[in-house]
Image (spheres, rainbow, N blue to C red):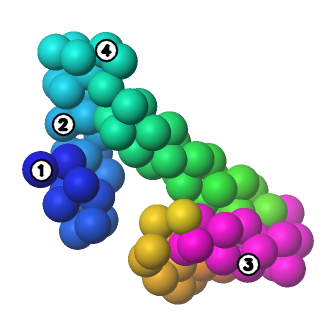
Amino acid sequence: MAKCYSSLGRKTDATRTYSKVLELDPSNAAALRETAELRQVENFKKQAQLAAEGGHFNSAVSLLVCARTRSGRQPRAHLRSCLVASTQQ
């Protein structure tokens, strides 16, 4: 179920489901791996937003490409929000 949530872009639901799996089986390798992966993707997105806000658009794009590679999803919407946020300062 968590993998389906993740594929649909429902990261909060995926994380919550993986957490429940880990409550039942703390050594579940798949849940541990996927939880770490979700955190890494979110970290790339946050770093990209900070880079864009600082005017470092090439870095922002590179970070979003990393996030896309890891999540399999298009980063365009997030890039757009980063760019909008950077122009509102």
Name the side, left or right, on which 89 lies relative to 31. right
Quarter of the image holding residue 49? bottom right
In the drawing, what numbered circle is on residue 61? 3
In the picture shown, does residue 10 fall above or below 28?
below
Answer whether residue 2 is magenta in the image.
no
In the drawing, what numbered circle is on residue 26? 4
In the picture shown, does residue 10 fall above or below 8?
above
Of badges 3 and 1, nearer the viewer stands: 1
Q: Nearer the viewer, residue 21 or 43?
A: 21
Q: Which residue position is annotated with label 1?
A: 1
Of badges 2 and 4, nearer the viewer stands: 4
| Amino acid marked by disc 3 | Val
Q: Residues within 10 Å of mark 2 (few under 14, many from 20)?
A: some
Instruction: Give how far apart the Cα atoms at labels 3 and 1 are.
Output: 31 Å
Q: Is residue 4 visible?
A: yes
The magenta span reads: 53-69
At 43% across and 77% down in the image, what residue appears? 73
Name the side, left or right, on which 41 lies relative to 88. left
Instruction: Give how far apart the Cα atoms at labels 1 and 4 are.
Output: 17 Å
| Amino acid marked by disc 2 | Thr
In the drawing, what numbered circle is on residue 17? 2
In the drawing, what numbered circle is on residue 13? none
> Where does residue 54 sit, x and y in percent of width and height?
85, 63
